[in-house]
Image (cartoon, grey):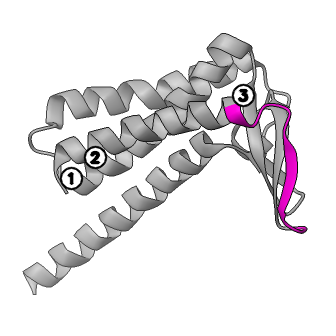
């Protein structure tokens, strides 16, 4: 995969997140009974509602703290960075920016994915967590490859 493709995937992820938040406003439907629902929720907490009740300004600051280092890294290291790292960072960036857009323009984050009647999230959360998981997988793979290269 080319680096440009990773950037395009990140941009598409952000657009898809924002579109789904508009599509699922005030929509509630059960997709898989007791497992997966579309359930509109105005979340004033953080990802998966882990810290519900924290002031929205703190959450906006957290998003900015995630966004700035990633943008700096991508600008400074783009030519040297591996494609899989760029893809991971673009997914994390799409997730952080998607929720920051909600906070800045709505004052809350729109969640619409309900998992097992216990947590609500949105595509921004999925992209953010997915990007972090991919980053860890790529880091572990790189460490294993370096170890075997030494032997």
User: Are discs 1 and 2 less than 8 Å apart at CB?
Assistant: yes
Q: Name the spot of residue 106 as percent of width and height, x first.
A: 72, 15
Cα gap from disc 3 to disc 1, whole angstroms = 30 Å
Q: Which residue is drawn at 64% across and 37% down?
A: 20
Image quarter in which the N terminus is found: bottom left
Q: Tell me what residue is drawn at x 89 percent, y 69 percent.
A: 33
Which of marks 2 and 3 precedes in the sequence?
2
108 sits left or right of 136 in the view: right
- Between discs 1 and 2, the one toward the N terminus: 2
Residue 67 image point, x, y percent:
43, 28
* Nearest the eye: 149 or 91: 91
Residue 100 occupies quadrant: top right
Please tell me the numbered disc located at residue 83: 1
Which span is picked out in magenta? 23-34
Q: Position of residue 126 (x, y in %)?
A: 59, 50
Q: Which residue is the site of mark 3?
A: 109
- Within the magenta stretch, is there residue 33? yes
Residue 50 visible within the image: no
Secondary element at tag 1 = helix
Proximity of marks 3 and 2: CB atoms separated by less than 8 Å: no
At horizontal 61% and vertical 29% (from top left) the residue drawn is 99
CA–CA distance in space, label 1 to label 2 = 7 Å
Q: Name the spot of residue 83 as percent of width and height, x first.
A: 21, 52
| Label 3: which secondary element | strand
Numbered label tally = 3
- For this view, does 125 lie left or right of residue 54? left
Q: Give how far apart the Cα atoms at labels 3 and 2 are.
A: 25 Å
Image quadrant for the C terminus?
A: bottom left
Q: Mark 2 points at which residue?
A: 6
């Amino acid at each position: 995969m080319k680096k440009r493709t990773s950037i395009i995937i990140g941009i598409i992820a952000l657009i898809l997140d924002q579109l789904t938040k508009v599509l699922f406003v005030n929509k509630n439907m059960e997709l898989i009974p007791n497992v997966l629902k579309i359930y509109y929720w105005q979340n004033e907490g953080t990802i998966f509602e882990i810290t519900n009740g924290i002031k929205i300004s703190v959450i906006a600051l957290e998003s900015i703290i995630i966004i700035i280092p990633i943008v700096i890294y991508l600008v400074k290291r783009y030519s040297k960075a591996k494609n899989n790292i760029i893809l991971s960072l673009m997914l994390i960036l799409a997730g952080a920016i998607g929720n920051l857009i909600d906070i800045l323009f709505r004052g809350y984050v729109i969640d619409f994915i309900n998992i097992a009647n216990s947590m609500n999230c949105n595509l921004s959360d999925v992209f953010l967590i997915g990007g972090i998981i991919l980053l860890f997988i790529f880091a572990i793979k790189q460490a294993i490859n370096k170890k075997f290269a030494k032997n």
